[in-house]
Amino acid sequence: QVQLVESGGGLVQPGGSLRLSCAASGSIFSIATMAWYRQAPGKERELVASITSGGITTYPDSVKGRFTISPDNAKMTVYLQMNSLKPEDTAVYYCKIRALTASGYVTAWGQGTQVTVSS
């Protein structure tokens, strides 16, 4: 099994920054992809950043230039640096990884961490 533990959410003023962390544990041989999603009240969950094992990143236009995803493979941790935050960034943020385990490839989600951008 794969477990993910997220941290780093909170309340921040518009224009501020936050860094989210997501630590993976379990019988993981390797990680194929890491990603961050968010879900605002009344809206569908959406991708905000992803990175492959080869280092290819993807960002939607809404966060491009403001958010940066970065992995620490040695720690099996993925970070999301969020700068120039806007009220519309308010949401619950979830990390997701796809990892190779003894049972084959599995997809795991974190429990979510609240990010609130408000003055």
Image (cartoon, rainbow, N blue to C red):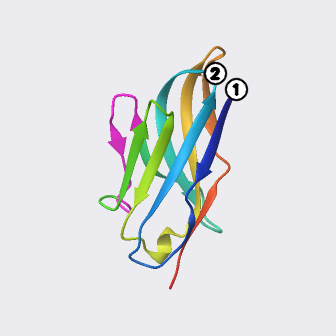
In the rendering, which numbered label is found on residue 27? 2
Q: Position of residue 23 (x, y in %)?
A: 57, 40
Q: Nearer the viewer, residue 95 or 21?
A: 21
The image quarter containing residue 65 is: bottom left
Q: Position of residue 84 (x, y in %)?
A: 36, 70
Q: Nearer the viewer, residue 14 or 73?
A: 73
Q: Residue furthest top?
A: 102
Q: Where 59 sits versus 28, above or below?
A: below
Disc 2 crowd, CA 10 A, few/some/many (<14, 14-19, 20+): some
Q: Residue at x 64, y 21 (%)?
A: 27
Q: Residue at x 63, y 36 (%)?
A: 108
Q: Residue at x 34, y 28 (%)?
A: 54
Q: Position of residue 39 (x, y in %)?
A: 59, 60
The image quarter containing residue 45 is: bottom right
Query: Disc 2, disc 1: CB below 8 Å?
Result: yes
Q: Where 6 sits versus 73, above or below?
A: below
The image quarter containing residue 55 is: top left
Magenta residues (range):
51-63
Which secondary structure lies at badge 1? Answer: loop
Most frequent secondary structure within the magenta stretch: loop
How far apart in space, not on screen, are marks 2 and 1 (Cα)?
A: 6 Å
Disc 1 crowd, CA 10 A, few/some/many (<14, 14-19, 20+): few
Q: Which residue is mark 1?
A: 1
Q: Residue at x 62, y 58 (%)?
A: 113
